[in-house]
Amino acid sequence: MIIDMLTRAFAKTPSALCVWAVLLLGLPAVWGDQWILAVEPSFMDHKMRRPIEGSQRTTLAIARVVNGEIEPLTREQKKSVHMTFDQIRAEALKTASATLSQMKPEFLRDKNGVIRHAAIESPDPLTASCVLAPEFGEKFRDTLGPDLLVAIPTRNQVLVFSRQDDTHLRLAETIIGNYLNSNQPVSREIFALEGGRLRSLGALQ
């Protein structure tokens, strides 16, 4: 009944009714493109990007999410964006938090049942960016401790380790293999997560 009424009325006042239809039917309203700091390999040569401390292989590409896809910002597009980098970053962190909230980490244990690392895998192209969510470290504090390392071999995979052991080194071959065999590789580096920011500790060999 409600849908029929909305359909008839929509022909008269489409834009206003579109908003009310979304609210009444409980559907999500998307008011604009999302900003993202996409963790990307430096060879992609995105023009609008920020460095990651200690890394020469991986960068943070300033991008928007358009129709579910990552679209890196171009220099020409930046001219029409009236936002500072800090403002863009604040919006990008909201996107990272929203992405992280949808992820379901899998915890991998050794033969004694002790958690050794966590794996986040998803077809969502924003998966890699979830490491920048301000609450990322807190999500793994109870299982892997306060000091974390992360590997981001592809856009769709994040591996999380405790900094207190060498599990990441024992998985080096797997991480490198995932990176080399992916159509959307990100990095073969290991990153420390410090104050919500990434710092490269070097590339796995």
Image (tube, rainbow, N blue to C red):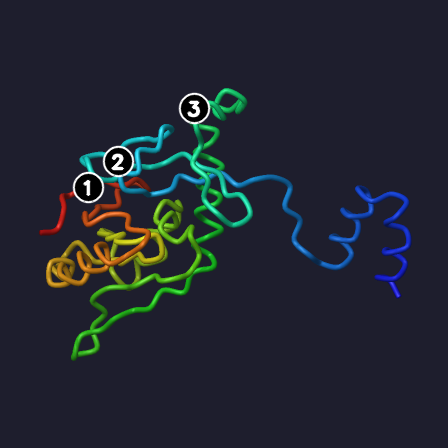
Mark number for residue 189?
none
Q: Residue 163's spot in the image, x, y percent?
A: 17, 54
Mark number for residue 200?
1
Residues at badges 2 and 3 in contact (C-beta under 8 Å)?
Answer: no
Q: Earlier in the sequence, mark 2 or mark 1?
A: 2
In front of the other: 162 or 73: 73
Q: Residue at x 19, y 41 (%)?
A: 200
Q: Residue 109's spot in the image, x, y percent?
A: 22, 73
User: Relative to 150, does residue 4 appear above or below in the rendering?
Assistant: below
Disc 2: which residue? 52
In front of the other: 33 or 92: 33
Residues at badges 2 and 1 in contact (C-beta under 8 Å)?
Answer: yes
Say few, some or many: other residues with alpha carbon within 10 Å of mark 2 (under 14 / 14 to 19 / 20 or more).
Answer: some
Amino acid found under the numbered disc labelled 1: Ser
Label 3 SS:
helix
In front of the other: 107 or 18: 18
Q: Residue at x 36, y 28 (%)?
A: 47
Q: Residue at x 34, y 61 (%)?
A: 120
Q: Earlier in the sequence, mark 1 or mark 3?
A: 3
Amino acid found under the numbered disc labelled 3: Arg
Label 2 SS:
loop
Disc 3: which residue? 75
Label 1 SS:
strand
Q: How many marks?
A: 3
Q: In screen coordinates, is 101 left or right of 187?
A: right
Disc nearest the viewer among 1 and 3? 3
* Distance from the alpha carbon under mark 2 to that under mark 1: 7 Å
Q: Residue at x 40, y 61 (%)?
A: 122
